[in-house]
């Protein structure tokens, strides 16, 4: 064993340096599983941009007659399965979550600390569980739906 | 129904999720290397390249920056649809160039001819240094502390014992343990698959 070489490295050693996970993340990459990649490609998914603009949200409760009057409808028992339409354009994830909560009448948990780093452009029509699952898959996060 | 509204001009600005879009682009034939392949290579080569840079710039933080810059530029090249025939060779030279650029800004810089060429010996050294670094990383906390106080800070066994309020015998035991782990790490070294590129 070459003590000279060990000493060379020891003299320059700093803890928590050369972590591939940290480096990969700090370079702006996120780890993608093959499952995520395949699902994403198959679904022909989302667009992501950096420029923030306001969210455009269309709330259309297909089964509700109140829609015609434009009134807000909150139906806790069926909120999760309700089919609604949402559009976002270059919108920060916290705003996306806020709109989802408002439109579907649910709570969302496990919001990542760096949520504002993500911005989305998407058009979605369906129930909230599928929407959240899709966002989770794309962003590799763990949002969960909590019924009100 | 979900649809994609891709904005290709934003790819280079975007971080994180833009890589997903790049994967989709790749699947439509725009890129020569998938992000998964790129990540695999990154994870295998990051530390050895870091050690290679460390021998040039002599600072762990700077060498990390050099390696990350080189990989980012490589990704931009891939993203632009350009093929990189020999990625291992390419990335070593890219790191070397990054280091030279950085050194140009330093007062002591004498010229690129003073920077060691990339050859088998330099790569072997990088690999060995990486194994040493990794072995130090994997030492138990107290063992690593004692080892670094001795080998990095130059303290004697007695000084370490006094500093940590432990016996000299414990210091010696921890040093023996550290060297044993390092010996194991170095003896398990082997030439990685990407070496024979020059």
Image (spheres, grey):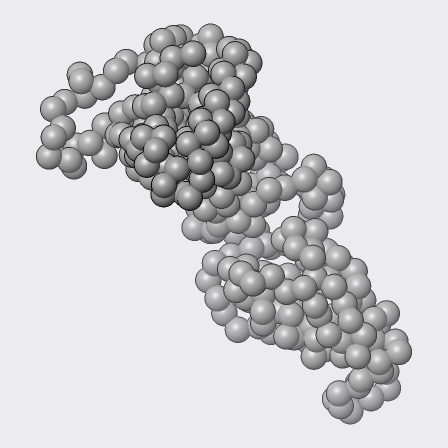
Q: Position of residue B27 (x, y in %)?
A: 63, 35
Q: Is residue A47 depicted above or below A87 in this figure?
A: above
Q: Residue at x 75, y 57 (%)?
A: A133
Q: Can residue A87 be seen?
A: yes
The x and y percentages for residue B114 are 18, 18
**What residue lies at 23% left-to-right and 34% top-to-bottom?**
B102
Q: Nearer the viewer, residue A86 or A75?
A: A75
- Horizontal side, residue B55 vs residue A1: left or right: left
Q: Residue B70, position in %: x, y? A: 37, 32
Q: Nearer the viewer, residue B148 or B123?
A: B148
Left or right: residue A22 versus residue B123 is: right
Task: Give the left or right position of residue B69, taking residue A99 as reference.
Answer: left
Image quadrant in which you'd find residue B101: top left
Number of numbered markers: 0
Specify whether B56 is left or right of A28. left
Question: Of B23 and A24, which appears nearest the observer?
Answer: A24
Which quarter of the rendering shows the C terminus of chain B? Answer: top left
Residue B38 or residue A26, whichever sits in front: A26
Quarter residue B55 falls in = top left
In this view, A31 is above or below A103: above
Instruction: Provide residue B171's location: percent of width, then percent of height.
Output: 44, 31
In the picture, the quarter occupied by the N terminus of chain B is bottom right
Residue at image location 60% in from the left, 33% down from the top: B36
Q: Examine the rendered structure and indicate whether residue B172 appears above or below residue A1.
A: below
| Quadrant hosting residue B166 | top left
| Residue lying at 72% horizontally and 56% vertically, measured from the top left | A134
Q: Is residue B89 visible?
A: no
User: In the picture shown, does residue B36 fall above or below B11?
Assistant: above
């Amino acid at each position: 064993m070459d003590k000279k070489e060990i000493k060379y490295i020891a003299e320059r050693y700093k803890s928590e340096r050369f972590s591939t996970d940290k480096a990969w993340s700090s370079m702006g990459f996120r780890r993608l599983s093959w499952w995520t990649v395949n699902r994403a490609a198959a679904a022909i998914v989302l667009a992501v941009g950096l420029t923030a603009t306001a969210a455009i949200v269309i709330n259309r409760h297909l089964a509700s007659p109140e829609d015609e009057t434009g009134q807000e409808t909150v139906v806790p028992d069926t909120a999760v399965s309700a089919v609604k339409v949402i559009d976002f354009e270059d919108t920060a994830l916290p705003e996306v979550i806020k709109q989802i909560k408002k439109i579907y009448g649910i709570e969302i948990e496990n919001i990542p600390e760096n949520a504002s780093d993500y911005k989305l452009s998407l058009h979605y029509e369906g129930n909230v569980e599928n929407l959240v699952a899709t966002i989770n898959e794309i962003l590799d996060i763990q949002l969960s739906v909590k019924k009100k | 129904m979900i649809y994609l509204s891709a904005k290709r001009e934003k790819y280079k600005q975007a971080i994180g999720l833009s890589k997903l879009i790049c994967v989709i682009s790749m699947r439509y034939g725009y890129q020569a290397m998938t992000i998964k392949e790129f990540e695999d290579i990154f994870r295998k080569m990051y530390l050895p390249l870091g050690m290679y840079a460390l021998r040039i710039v002599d600072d762990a933080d700077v060498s990390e920056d050099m390696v990350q810059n080189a990989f980012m530029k490589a990704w931009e090249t891939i993203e632009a649809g350009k093929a990189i025939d020999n990625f291992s060779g390419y990335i070593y030279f890219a790191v070397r160039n990054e280091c030279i650029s950085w050194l140009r800004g330093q007062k002591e810089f004498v010229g690129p001819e003073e920077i060691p060429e990339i050859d088998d010996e330099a790569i072997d050294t990088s690999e060995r240094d990486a194994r040493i670094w990794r072995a130090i990383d994997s030492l138990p906390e107290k063992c690593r502390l004692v080892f670094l106080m001795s080998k990095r800070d130059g303290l004697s066994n007695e000084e370490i014992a006094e500093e940590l309020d432990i016996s000299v015998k414990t210091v010696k035991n921890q040093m023996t343990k550290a060297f044993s782990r390092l010996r194991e790490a170095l003896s398990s070294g082997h030439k990685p698959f990407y070496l024979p590129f020059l």
